[in-house]
Image (tube, rainbow, N blue to C red):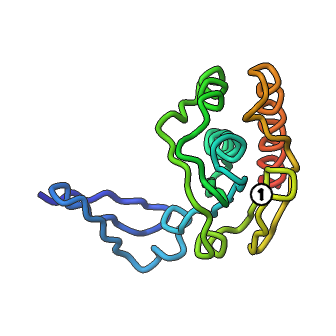
């Protein structure tokens, strides 16, 4: 069964084969349409990808400006996302319990527009990307929940400021 959807602003048509989930684009202007272009990506990096970078990714994706998405990765990924990070984000109404930690790769660094190093200290990775920011956020993994909550709030503020800057 074939279904067609049209976007008159972009003068293209997406042909959807619902039984196989295939998408084909048709029309002369589909490359110019913003809806067809790939999203710009921001990469949040910390050592283990279990706390700070996961929180930053979650906040960014919740409040992301149009055309942007976030991913996160780490130099030495932990086995899973830290339980306090999950608790703290649930307080904010964001569920990150399904997230997996990821290893940072050269390919990942090269495909992003912005990389943000959220960790502090000598173990922070060196990132090769078009634009790199360093936030030097303290490690909340060994902090009591109240201290980690302050770090979460610091990350949220920084992410919202970054989003504001991207919208300009």
On the picture, is 73 further left or further right than 29? right
Of residue 112 and residue 35, the one placed in the foreground of this image is 112
Q: Which residue is mark 1?
A: 116
Neighbourhood count class around disc 1 (C-alpha, 10 Å): few under 14, some 14–19, many 20 upward = many
Please, what secondary structure does the residue beneath circle 1 have?
Answer: strand
Residue at image coords 62%, 39%: 62
* Residue 35 to residue 81: above or below: below
User: Image quadrant for the N terminus?
Assistant: bottom left
Q: Position of residue 99 (x, y in %)?
A: 51, 42
Residue at image coords 35%, 71%: 25
* Residue 134 to residue 13: above or below: above
Residue at image coords 60%, 53%: 77
Q: How many marks?
A: 1
Q: Position of residue 79 (x, y in %)?
A: 53, 46
User: Image quadrant for the C terminus?
Assistant: bottom right
Give the quadrant of residue 75.
bottom right
Q: Position of residue 11 (x, y in %)?
A: 43, 69
């Amino acid at each position: 069964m074939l279904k067609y959807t049209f976007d008159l602003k972009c003068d293209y048509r997406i042909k959807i084969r619902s039984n196989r989930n295939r998408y084909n684009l048709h029309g002369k202007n589909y490359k110019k349409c913003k809806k067809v272009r790939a999203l710009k990506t921001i990469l949040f990096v910390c050592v283990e990808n279990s706390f700070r970078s996961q929180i930053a990714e979650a906040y960014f994706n919740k409040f992301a400006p149009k055309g942007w998405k976030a991913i996160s990765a780490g130099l030495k990924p932990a086995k899973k996302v830290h339980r306090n990070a999950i608790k703290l984000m649930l307080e904010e109404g964001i569920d990150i319990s399904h997230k997996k930690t990821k290893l940072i790769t050269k390919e990942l660094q090269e495909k992003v527009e912005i990389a943000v190093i959220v960790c502090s200290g000598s173990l922070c990775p060196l990132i090769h990307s078009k634009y790199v920011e360093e936030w030097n956020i303290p490690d909340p993994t060994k902090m009591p929940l109240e201290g980690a909550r302050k770090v979460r709030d610091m990350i949220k503020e920084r992410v919202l400021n970054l989003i504001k800057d991207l919208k300009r």
